[in-house]
Amino acid sequence: MHEQAAAEYLAECFWPGVKESDLRALDERVTASVASLAQDGGEVRYLGSLLMREDEVVLCRFEGPEASVRRVAEHAEIPFERILEASSSPWTGNQREEIER
C-alpha cells in the first residue's frame, strides 16, 4: 500500500518591523494552538517559520488539512495574508557525494 504524503501549506505574512523575538513568540503561540487542536482530534504539524528580513515577510510551514491549518493560524494570531498550498523537494543529503558516485 502506498501512503499519501500530508498536504503542506504556508501561511504568508507581510510583517513590517518583524524581529527575531516576534518569531519566537509566534512559534510559542503556534505550538500551543497545534496542541489545543490535537486535543480536539485535529491533525496539524507545525514545520517552523522562515523570515526574509529584507522583504519583511514570514512564511509559516504546516502539514495537515487546509481547514485545520487555517484554524491553527487564526487561533495563534499569525498575521497572515493568505494560506497557500505548497510542495517541497526531499533533502537528499550531501549532493556532492551523490555526484561523485
Image: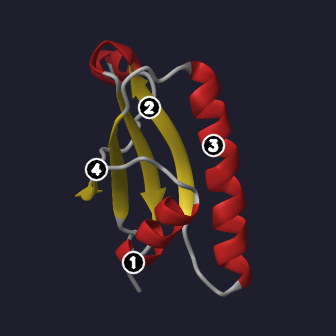
Q: Distance between the residues labelled 2 and 3?
A: 11 Å
Q: Mark 2 points at which residue?
A: 50
In terms of secondary structure, where does tag 2 sit?
Answer: strand
In terms of secondary structure, where does tag 3 sit?
Answer: helix
Q: Mark 4 points at which residue?
A: 81
Q: Which of marks 4 and 3 is in front?
A: 4
Q: Are marks 4 and 1 in contact (CB under 8 Å)?
A: no
Lower position in the chain sequence, tag 4 or tag 2 = 2
Going by the numbered disc 3, the residue's amino acid type is: Asp
Q: Which of marks 4 and 2 is in front?
A: 4
Give percent across and percent down for residue 67: 39, 77
Lower position in the chain sequence, tag 3 or tag 1 = 3
Going by the numbered disc 2, the residue's amino acid type is: Leu
Q: Mark 3 points at which residue?
A: 27
Q: Mark 1 points at which residue?
A: 67
Q: Nearer the viewer, residue 74 or 58?
A: 74
At x 44%, y 49%, the residue is 61
Q: Nearer the viewer, mark 4 or mark 1?
A: 4
Q: In which quarter of the image is residue 20?
A: top right
Give percent across and percent down for residue 12: 32, 45
Lower position in the chain sequence, tag 2 or tag 3 = 3
Going by the numbered disc 4, the residue's amino acid type is: Glu
Lower position in the chain sequence, tag 4 or tag 3 = 3
